Amino acid sequence: MRIANCRPTINRLFYTSLTLISAILLGGLGKLSESNNNTALAQENIPISGSGDAQLQPILQSLTEFMRHRCVGAAVLGVSVKGKPVGVWGLGRMKGRPTNNWNPACGDDMQAPLAPPVAADTPMRMGSISKPVTFAMVRWVLKQTARDRAGLELTDDQIEGMKLFDPEHYPPLIPGLNKQYPVAIIPEKLHAVFSGKVKFPVPVKDSKCANLNSGFADKQWQNVTLGHFLSHRSGLQRSAPRYGEDVTANLPVLRNLKTPANFQAQEQLLVNEWGYKSITSAKNQLGISPSVGYFLPSPTLTETMQILAGRCLQYPLGQYHYSNTSPAFPTIILQQLIASGSYAAKMGKPATHQGSALEVFFKTELGISTAADRGIFMSQEVENIGDREPVKRHWNGKTYYWKGWDLKRPHCIWKGSFCDFATWLNPKPGRINWSWNLSQVPFSSRNTDLSPGTGSLAAEAEVSLKFMSQYWVGGYENNPRIGEKRNNVWNRYTAHNGALDGTHAWAIQLGGNTNPKEWKLPPVDDNGRILDDFANLKMYAGVLPEGVDVFVAVNQRADKKCVEAKGYNCGDAYGMLNNFILYGVSQVNWNLVAPRAVEK
């Protein structure tokens, strides 16, 4: 069924719920009348900060309708045309409901005071949109290193075709050249186990496919290329090994720790980094004798992958199966080749963002200066630095801001001939947290359980637009396009979404014959407004432009209404976010939109 393509009659000035003085301070945005949407009282406008071309109001209208229907408290939106921003906005408020005129069915505390509005440069977590950023970075570092170390100009196809665990070649052969890559891109220990030269250190029981009784990694690994990871076609299952039982408890095996002196040497690494006083205080809090218990540095990503070698590959090589483990090896390559050895800032050390792969890539390739909480950065799950993101919303009084035992300070107690992690695995009286105290810490969300490139990056909308202007955000084909340079190509459609606790985001690149021609939406009224009827979806047909990029993110992925609904669920409802945006885009007269710099 087609919904009538009716363009609403609108005031071309942008609306805000701030006072007139505040509106002037926000760049002269005026107030736009809204349809009462079958209510007797006019709705109070959701506050909007930022600026952009007045022709883009239909996109803002669609987003605010989504926010009202889905009880969304905060959002960011950025739009560009052929790489030039034409609008960047923050919508809603940094905490709680965005207006006083709010649907009681959302379950918000209507007595709580309204929080400050969301600024246009407010960062939002991107979830899995972190993957195209990671894949662009690994392409960049491999090309740059080959250029610097051997004068080689490599293509994306050559990079994608390198077999990372070829038992005959370390470093890997470059396809099309009778040469190996100039430096090692995978740590030698990791290459040895995945290439089948040595047995894996720890077997992982797996009900999803046969256990590896031979003691050697699945032979399929020997033919896995970087392109297989970039396209989710290596055979990996979706999840990583368990952090505690599979990885941390096996650190003695991974690090060949056999004697008390070995464990003392491990603890000394922490003493060197954090000071003797921190480690001694932590032991006293746990009631552990200095000569009996030991703290160990947390598992690295490389060690987690060593454990992965003991698990079979579930799917045939070349068959698409989305895996949150796929970015792990690209992240390891970044860490191997970048001078600092780090992807992003370390937990509790925001200054280490400087020199990280994330910081260097955005500065050198895109001309963007970033910091541990500016531009684009790793959103740290423990709230140890100022959080510029809006408060992540749950539903019905529930919260993503909970206290729990942090896992980053593992300890074991020497018993007989081995060091036992039992008290750490079963925290009684508790675990030492990242700041070396015996207490639970506030978490702002669930982590991604693996590398930051899997889904824990946060970004400002304008920075996301800048990235999207230069790199493809989607394309998981056999010859993966994701993360490749865009090279001023505007006639191709691709998109990527991200969803995590307190996050739902879309990066959309519009263009060409592959643009969506129709998409599902709740019904649209005679004024062109999308109604709050997610149980009665209709097919909408529209025409989308070429060369338009959109980044949108909201601070939730569930609400009381969809949790309690009988005709649809939250996954389906929030899956409509991109369709709301596409509808708004289809209502814009793009011939009248002038690409220009967004006001700062």
Image (cartoon, rainbow, N blue to C red):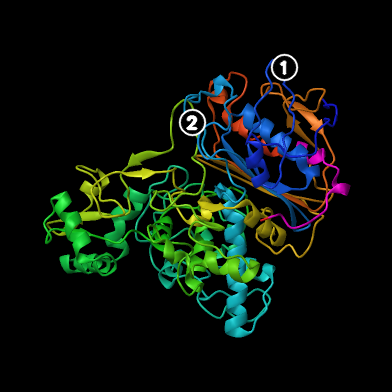
The numbered mark at residue 373 is none
Tell me if 276 is positioned left or right of 63 in this view. Answer: left
Question: Does dot 1 land on a helix, a strand or a loop?
Answer: loop
Residue that lies at the very extreme toward the bottom in this rendered image: 150
Q: Residue 30 magenta-drawn?
A: no
Name the spot of residue 555 as percent of width and height, x first: 55, 39
Query: For mark 1, does the 10 Å Cα neighbourhood hold few (<14), some (14 to 19), or many (20 or more) residues?
Result: few
Mark 1 and mark 2 lie on one chain; the one further toward the N terminus is 1
Tell me if 300 is positioned left or right of 146 in this view. Answer: left
Closer-to-camera residue (543/203)? 543
The residue depicted at 31 percent of the width and 54 percent of the height is 434
Question: Does dot 2 land on a helix, a strand or a loop?
Answer: loop
Is residue 274 depicted above or below 64 in this figure? below
Residue with the mark numbered 1 = 38
Residue with the mark numbered 2 = 113
Tell me if 229 is positioned left or right of 341 in this view. Answer: right
The residue depicted at 71 percent of the width and 45 percent of the height is 28
Residue type indicated by callout 1 = Asn
The residue depicted at 44 percent of the width and 37 percent of the height is 400
Tell me if 80 is positioned left or right of 98 in this view. Answer: right
Q: Quadrant of residue 147?
A: bottom right
Residue range in magenta is 582-599
Q: Residue 588 magenta-drawn?
A: yes
Find out whether the residues at labels 1 and 2 contact each other: C-beta distance under 8 Å. no
Q: CA distance from mark 1 to mark 2?
A: 27 Å
Name the spot of residue 337 as percent of width and height, x first: 51, 73
